[in-house]
Amino acid sequence: MAAFTKPTADELAFFVRSVGLGKIDEFRVVEAGSVNSNFSLICDGKRFFLRIFEEQGEAGAADEIVRIRTISARGVLTPAAVGQGTLAGKPAALFPWVDGGISCQRAVSPARAFALGRALADVHRAGADLPASPNRFDAEALRARLGRIERAYPVVRLRAALDAAEAARDPNIPRGFVHGDLFRDNVLWAAPGSDRLVALLDFESASHGPLAFDLAVTLLAWCYGDAFEPSLARALVAGYEAARPMGIDEKRALYTESLFGAIRFTITRITDYAMRGGENRVMKDWRRFLARLDALEAMGPSGFEALIT
């Protein structure tokens, strides 16, 4: 469960009062997430989502909250914070609770992939003029993580793949505000079997970067079971382009950005999960993203083009 910090009753009561709420009716851990501490909070008969930011300082958390409020006001389906402050000595924010369900991989349909692609394009359009924010997972940061990884993991291969992918990236494709982590557990659907998307969540990894990278990460997360699924990949890209058409160079760059994404999540899952462990951490298997890297390298650019068109 995601509760690395557990506030005392007095700390929680003080925070609730500071954001203008009253009686606490219920407080419990949300058994999801792997970086921050997340809770369900019912106050005065209303339910909220409470997040304690574990890895961001006050400035980083405040910037994230402002960015989310901005894109929410511009029509992106994401709940904006209704209160923020300090809880248990760390930045915290309170969001409206959104009812909805997370899709399992078997439930990902072309209709859902299309809706998701369109929603991601809405994020990119809404965040087009947001100030640039640093990327904690750029190539330099990933190389630093590789330096900490034990030799029991495929460090040599990952370093070579990272160098090759970084050299091949196109610096001229459109850049802007990217979510960076649009996995299945960060998207809510109206009901089981419904194709209506009700919320995009968790902009913890949001930064300034290539928009194609964001679409590539989403493709890696949603369009791969035991192998890449062409019907899902095509629907995702089609949904995205229905709201934000891509140029030829940007669409061609999706292959290299997918390689970079597969490398990024292989490395961070080794450093953040395999090397840490812990009872309170949702484990994510780095080998699942190494398998995606294998598949991408095997298909090459032409095979990837066939996958998405």
Image: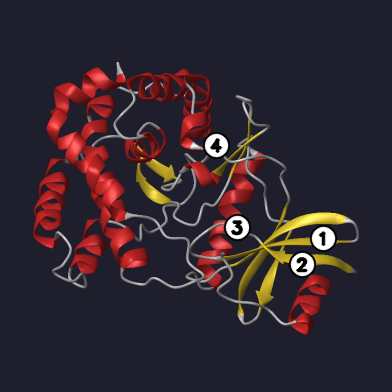
In front: label 1 or label 4: 4
Work out how far the residue at label 3 is from the one at label 2, CA to CA, in angstroms: 22 Å
Secondary element type, mark 4? loop
Work out how far the residue at label 4 is from the one at label 2, CA to CA, in angstroms: 25 Å
Secondary element type, mark 1? strand
* Residue carrying label 2: 27
Task: Say if mark 1 contacts mark 2, CB within 8 Å.
Answer: yes
Q: Earlier in the sequence, mark 1 or mark 3?
A: 1
Identity of the residue drawn at 14% across and 62% down: 155
Identity of the residue drawn at 67% across and 50% down: 80
Image quadrant containing the C terminus: top left
Question: Residue 65: which numbered mark, if any?
Answer: 3
Secondary element type, mark 3? helix
Q: Earlier in the sequence, mark 3 or mark 4?
A: 3
Q: Earlier in the sequence, mark 4 or mark 2?
A: 2
Question: Residue 42: which numbered mark, if any?
Answer: 1
Q: Earlier in the sequence, mark 3 or mark 2?
A: 2
Work out how far the residue at label 1 is from the one at label 4, CA to CA, in angstroms: 25 Å
Q: Quadrant of residue 294?
A: top left
Q: Nearer the viewer, residue 41 or 176?
A: 41
Up/down of 278 relative to 226, above or below: below
